[in-house]
Image (cartoon, helix red, strand yellow):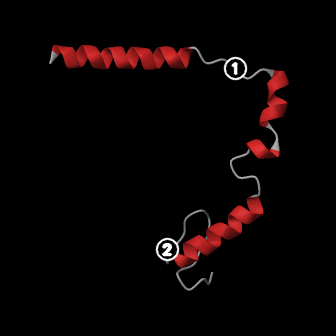
Amino acid sequence: MIFRKLLACLALASALNGCAMMQAVQPWEKDLLAKEEMQLVPDRVEEFFDGRVYFSREASFGGKGVGGGGCGCN
């Protein structure tokens, strides 16, 4: 039991130590992060319409700002 607590404390300490070593993004590095290739969703319009198709096929209501049911109507 003591071994598990010691192991958990050691894991927590190492995780916190790893987070403490993170550095801030420098101003000259921000141009690389702002490129279109670095975005999670490069094309917002295409992602919106893909979401509409997905949620209408899944017969779900709502989610991602898309209203309507399985019939595809709003």
The answer to whether the residues at label 1 and label 2 have Cβ atoms under 8 Å apart is: no
According to the picture, the residue beneath numbered tag 1 turns out to be 24
Q: Residue, x 73% and y 45% (percent of image)?
A: 39
Q: Residue, x 51% and y 73% (percent of image)?
A: 61
Q: Position of residue 27 (x, y in %)?
A: 82, 22
Q: Callout 1: 10 Å neighbours few (<14), some, many (20+)?
A: few
* Marks 1 and 2, the one that precedes in the sequence: 1
Q: Residue, x 76% and y 64% (percent of image)?
A: 45
Q: Callout 2: 10 Å neighbours few (<14), some, many (20+)?
A: some
Q: Position of residue 36 (x, y in %)?
A: 81, 46
Residue type of the residue flagged with mark 1: Ala
Helix, strand, or loop for circle 2?
A: loop
Left/right of residue 37 with respect to residue 21 in the rendered view:
right
Instruction: From this view, report whether residue 52 is shown above or below residue 28.
Output: below
Q: List the single residue furthest toward the front.
A: 37
Q: Distance between the residues labelled 1 and 2?
A: 41 Å
Left/right of residue 10 with respect to residue 28 in the rendered view:
left
Q: Position of residue 15 (x, y in %)?
A: 44, 20
According to the picture, the residue beneath numbered tag 2 turns out to be 60
Instruction: From this view, report whether residue 18 is shown above or below residue 36.
Output: above
